[in-house]
Image (cartoon, grey):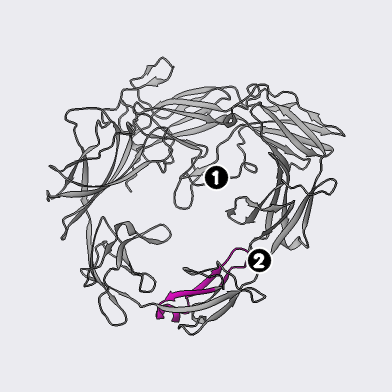
Amino acid sequence: MKTLALTSALVISLVGLWTLPLSIAANGIFEVTPNPATLDQLTFRVVNDDAHAIESVVCKYSIYSQGQTDPLRGELKTKLVDDVFRIPITEPVYGRIRIWIDADDGKDRSWSGYDDFSYHLRDVSDPAPALIELNHGIVVRGQVISQRDGEPIAGAEVAPMRLGHHFAYPLWDRAGRTDSGGRFRIATDGADGVEARHSEFANNKTEFWRGNGKPPADLQIVLSPKRQARGRVVDERGEPISGVDVGDSTTDKEGRFTISMSMDQWRSPKSITTFYAPGYQYHTMSTRSLSLGNDRETTITLQRMPRVSGMVVDQDGQPIADAKIQIQEKREYVQDVFVDVPTVNGRWEAFVDENCQEFVLRISTGETVQYSKTHRNDEIAGPIEVSIPVGHRIEGRFAAPVQQEHAPTILLRDAQERIIRQAAANDDGRFTLAGVEDGTYTLQLYPARYEIYCSGTYGSDPLFEQNTKGFWEQKITISGADVDVSAIDLAKENLLPGRIEGVAVDPRNPNVALANGFIYLVDDLERWDTVGNSYYMDRVMTDSSGKFAIPVCPPGQYYLVTSDSPTSHDSENDGYVLVMSGSTTQVTLRRKPEKQQRDFR
């Protein structure tokens, strides 16, 4: 038996050279002084630089708290009393609140503000309100009229536009509506343009301005009346195709659709209409090829996408009815997920995108992956028949039962290092790899791992991307009989996850705790996506005393980063931590003040 074990040493390197008022608690974790800046009540005072009277505000907020899966979001329109208002909530008792404030005088002025605060609700007779500074916003005025006759359009929505990383986007939650004279007024914190829309007029119209961010004194937005194009979508045999997405329309059971556009859009040589339906090739055509008018109809023919099909049988040629079929399309720069394919008595059929040259076919029975192979579309001449032999079984068990979230990943590789089987242990710690033919294999166990997130949205497939900070392996030879693997001591082989407990210090004040802050567990500080979002393995919160815990972490060395933001962290680490298998690592995090981060919007 060969074991690649992790180094049995604990190294914690903390950034910062200050002496902190630390004490050792009964549980061994360092404690720091509670943060006096933590609010006792969610009471706030708004201030603006010109002392202009504000009677009411619109407050949007998000509250994050330790142990909470999703933030509590709310919106409150409230009157001010001596510039003060209160958010009337009682739970969660402690957390971090992010607040967005909008206010205007109904005439020519508007204000907006943002801030975030740590809080711990307590009964106090006269809570001191937290200050939120308001900055001057802008007021956009204008009129929306019809291109046909210049008449004003009532009831049109007009929203401020922002320039993003890749494209501009409208903020419809801040939109205003035109009155009977087509006029609108929008109060907002800032905008690069506006977008207008109306259900009886063609596609949205956008107006941008440049310079110092101030809009023109009186905008005029012209919407074009809708013109309709009708058509019918059929397959190669002339049969109608229902459910085809055509622009913002969908075909009915007879394959018919109606889409709306302006004359300018119809005339434009750059205007394209797209047709998409599952199982058919994506189709585009010049919008001008469509006929306008109620008495005309354009017919579009869609070609079927390449199909792959197959059959799953046992070694006697009998269908395996409970086989699970999955396909992953492989494209450059894109990581597609595995998609389940319906099966009927072992038979299956799926469509593969025309732009995808390769796909991975994966077949499982029970908890075991029995077949995983990459196929090329141009090499497939007929159905793919996969025979899953009864073969032999590799039986294994852990020396002691383990919780599912702590159980390692179990893989079997062939002589070419390809993964041919995957298994999961049951509650007793036993696992089975079935249908294995004679030969030499490598059984590998990887510690329980986290998926890698980017702003909490991205996860990789655990079969093909494992934590590589340590693993256990054993060569196995099968020759005409099943194989029993000796009990595996997960603790001895460093295959149990570790736990991190600690306390974080406020980056703005080295003498107090980071109350209700965010701790990011990071494998690589240089992993960012194209818009600057940071990848991380886990994110937890501190409580009102700055304490935090990461209950499950694969053994290895990682970075810990503190932040006020629930969506990102910077590239500076607060501490290095070496997590030991089955052990709890205790750490105190601190950072230099020039490394503090603030996320304003």
Label 2 vs 1, first from the N-terminus: 2
Q: Answer with left or right where residue 242 lies relative to residue 228.
A: right
- List the residue tagged with mark 2: 305
Amino acid type at image mark 2? Met
Instruction: Look at 66% across and 75% down and name the residue there.
Output: 236
Circle 2/circle 1 CB separation < 8 Å:
no
Where residue 1 sits in the image (x, y, percent)? Answer: 75, 26
Could you tell me how far apart the alpha carbons at marks 2 and 1 are, in whole angstroms? 28 Å
What residue is shown with label 1?
459
- Residue 362: x and y, percent? 70, 48
**In the displayed structure, does residue 348 sit left or right of residue 277?**
right
Q: Quadrant of residue 71?
A: top left
Q: Can you give x and y, in whole percent of width and height, for residue 489 in the image?
A: 67, 22
The residue lying at 15 percent from left, 48 percent from top is 49
Q: Secondary structure at mark 1?
A: loop
Going by the numbered disc 1, the residue's amino acid type is Gly
Rendered position, 275 above or below 509: below
Query: As drawn, which residue projects farthest toward the bottom?
Result: 295
Residue 373 pos. (x, y %) = 73, 50
Position of 527 relative to 431 (above/below): below
Query: Residue 339 magenta-drawn?
Result: no
Q: Which residues are magenta?
A: 256-283
- The image quadrant that residue 176 belongs to is bottom left
Query: Can residue 209 be seen at all in this image of the molecule?
Result: no
